[in-house]
Image: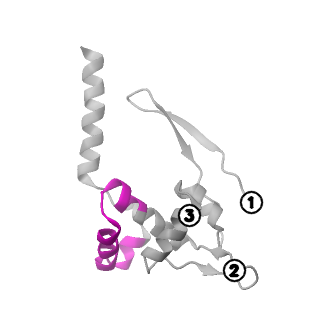
């Protein structure tokens, strides 16, 4: 199992240090623990989402019945997380949104930008700057 180390440290405008983590190395299948680390979710959340989102169905190995996630499953988990935690959708709302999205959008969740969230982030950073200038 590969342990991810911080790649670099970033300092935001507000002075907070943020870590950029490396992405898991490319391979065909990933264990639930690997997916949990990359998505910063607990394994029980991933198992729950498998029940709630029919499009999230990782394979299970024949021998020990472990979940085997592929890269597209990880991308879907990231998209679900974004819909629930960032955009504020309910589970039902996120499920409906994923059903209506073209398959290409589900595979690339990092390209989806919520303008309202982005503007809120910019506003908070500008308020910090204004506070420094006072």
Q: CA distance from mark 1 to mark 3?
A: 20 Å
Tell me which numbered mark, 1 or 2, is placed earlier along the sequence: 1
Tell me which corner region of the image, top left, top right, bottom left or bottom right, holds residue 113: bottom left
Q: Position of residue 75 (x, y in %)?
A: 48, 67
In the depicted structure, whether residue 17 falls above or below residue 79: above
- For label 2, the SS is loop
Is 76 covered by the magenta stretch?
no
Q: CA distance from mark 2 to mark 3?
A: 16 Å
- Which disc number belongs to residue 44? 3
Q: Quadrant of the C terminus?
A: top left
Q: Position of residue 45 (x, y in %)?
A: 51, 63
Stretch of the chain drawn in magenta: 81-106
Q: Left of 128 or right of it: where is 77?
A: right
Q: Classify 10 Å Cα crowding around label 3: few (below 14), some (14-19), many (20 and above).
A: few
Q: Quadrant of the N terminus?
A: bottom right
| Callout count | 3
Q: Classify 10 Å Cα crowding around label 1: few (below 14), some (14-19), many (20 and above).
A: few
Q: Left of 79 or right of it: where is 44?
A: right
Q: CA distance from mark 1 to mark 2?
A: 18 Å
Q: Which residue is mark 1?
A: 1
In the depicted structure, whether residue 8 falls above or below residue 106: above
The rendered magenta stretch, by its main secondary structure, is classed as helix
- Which disc number belongs to residue 65? 2
Q: Give the mark toward the camera: 1 or 3.
A: 3
Q: Give the mark toward the camera: 2 or 3.
A: 3
- For label 1, the SS is loop
Identify which residue is drawn at 37% across, 55% down: 85
């Amino acid at each position: 199992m590969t342990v991810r180390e911080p790649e670099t440290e970033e300092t935001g405008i507000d002075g907070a240090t943020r870590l950029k983590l490396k992405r898991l190395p490319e391979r065909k299948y990933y264990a639930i623990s690997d997916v949990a680390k990359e998505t910063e979710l607990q394994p029980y959340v991933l198992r729950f989402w498998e029940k709630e989102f029919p499009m999230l169905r990782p394979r299970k190995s024949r021998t020990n019945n472990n979940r085997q996630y592929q890269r597209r499953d990880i991308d879907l988990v990231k998209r679900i997380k974004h819909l629930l935690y960032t955009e504020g959708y309910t589970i039902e709302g996120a499920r409906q949104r994923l059903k209506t999205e073209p398959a290409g959008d589900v595979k690339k969740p990092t390209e989806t930008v919520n303008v309202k969230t982005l503007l809120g982030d910019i506003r908070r950073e500008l308020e910090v700057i204004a506070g420094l200038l006072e």
